[in-house]
Amino acid sequence: MKKSIGILGGMGPLATADLFRKIVLMTDAARDNDHIRIYIDDNASIPDRTAAILSGGADPLPAMTESLRKLESCGADCVIMPCNTAHYFLPRLQALTEIPFLSMLEATAKACAARFPGKTAAVLATKGTLSAGLYQAALKKEGVSFLIPEDAEQDALMRVIYDGVKAGKGPDTYRADMLSVVEALTARGADYFILGCTELPLAAQALSLPQPTVDPTAELAKAAIRFCGYSVKDL
Amino acid sequence: MKKSIGILGGMGPLATADLFRKIVLMTDAARDNDHIRIYIDDNASIPDRTAAILSGGADPLPAMTESLRKLESCGADCVIMPCNTAHYFLPRLQALTEIPFLSMLEATAKACAARFPGKTAAVLATKGTLSAGLYQAALKKEGVSFLIPEDAEQDALMRVIYDGVKAGKGPDTYRADMLSVVEALTARGADYFILGCTELPLAAQALSLPQPTVDPTAELAKAAIRFCGYSVKDL
């Protein structure tokens, strides 16, 4: 029996569409019926994760749990969520379900260790993700060296994510911010960039960013494809 | 209370991802929480629709009904499906549910009448869709004049759809077939093209097709956004 994927989505919607598309494109399939069955709850009502972690914003866990229950009742064999910051809540979600809930952070850290041994990563992520130490812990576990942005760089990244991609704006609105962050981190010794917020692979693609990157959305897609017993076709 | 969308998908998976992305991009929203909640069952096990209509292939209705039930139990307020050929089964699916099931054919025919009054459409679609007269009936109802491909052109289109897009191949594999069909129909008097199989907007985009087109996936996305009470933002 082939396994299926449940996507706990909506964080944000465009990133959810990006994850879905990457799973389809990277599944080694020659016709519709060779593909993986995927259930998606693109739940736009989930409160902002960074606001919940840093500034007492509404708790997203109840809405995430409601989505998890819907994916369970559909029959999903594993669950994934295309939001790095949301992984702050992953241990609590994993405790709520019998279904394997795959970690985007773990998939990404393993990909960094395999693809860039001995090199230094720069972690580009939201304030919520970095304040909670989510990537720091995952990368340390895999022995990956890394840098994180300084405060002003982090503010620029938040503008790229919230005022740019999540607001549905084009690359002209965030080019200067994104390039300034990448250049500053390169000057401090970064060899490659972890696009550790699901809006950032979309920004990097729109900007045709030339630096080497690791795309956690793509790494999560590959991990889920393999979990389901299918072969991965590189993009 | 905001309304949600259920997508009965998997026919094919890449077309389902395309519809999802178009809904997100065309919803007039400035942040994650302004978006529409979308439930998707990307059901890759649904048997081929053209084979069922034309050559006694397995009946897709049971698998489609199973997906419909899952979308209902998630709480979808309307249902749409990104497969023109599958609309052969639409009256039977509509009879099985209380939820409004929006028609891609109807949305497309209305868009043709509004955008190209007095002009002649060429309908590019699968053999199943055209043999069943699905677009012919929808266009006649809106008073839209149209041409359909001849047999050899139709064979070329099926290669574009099945051996190209559904098989995950790039535009080099189907460029000659697609262009020959478009040129022959233009010579016979077509003013614009209905990309009436959900794989064809993907092919047209990959080929940067210069002819005026109507994209049924985009028209269905707009109809669903409006049904849910949201404003449409053009791509």
Image: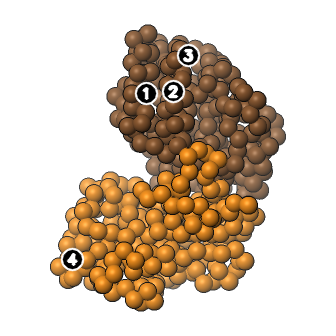
Chain colours: A brown, B orange
Which mark is in front, 4 or 3?
A: 3
Q: Which residue is mark 1?
A: A178
| Residue B63 to residue A137: above or below | below
Residue B8 visible in the snapshot: no
Are the residues under badges 2 and 4 in a single subunit? no
| Residue B225 to residue B109: above or below | above
Contact between labelled residues 3 and 1, with CB atoms less than 8 Å apart? no
Q: Identify the residue shown where x is 42% and y is 36%.
A: A173
Tag 1 secondary structure: helix
Report x, y in % for residue A25: 46, 49
Quarter occupied by residue A220: top right
Contact between labelled residues 1 and 2, with CB atoms less than 8 Å apart? yes
Q: Disc 1 and disc 3: Cα gap in Å?
A: 14 Å
Q: Residues within 10 Å of mark 2 (few under 14, many from 20)?
A: many
Report x, y in % for residue A128: 65, 26
Report x, y in % for residue A85: 64, 32
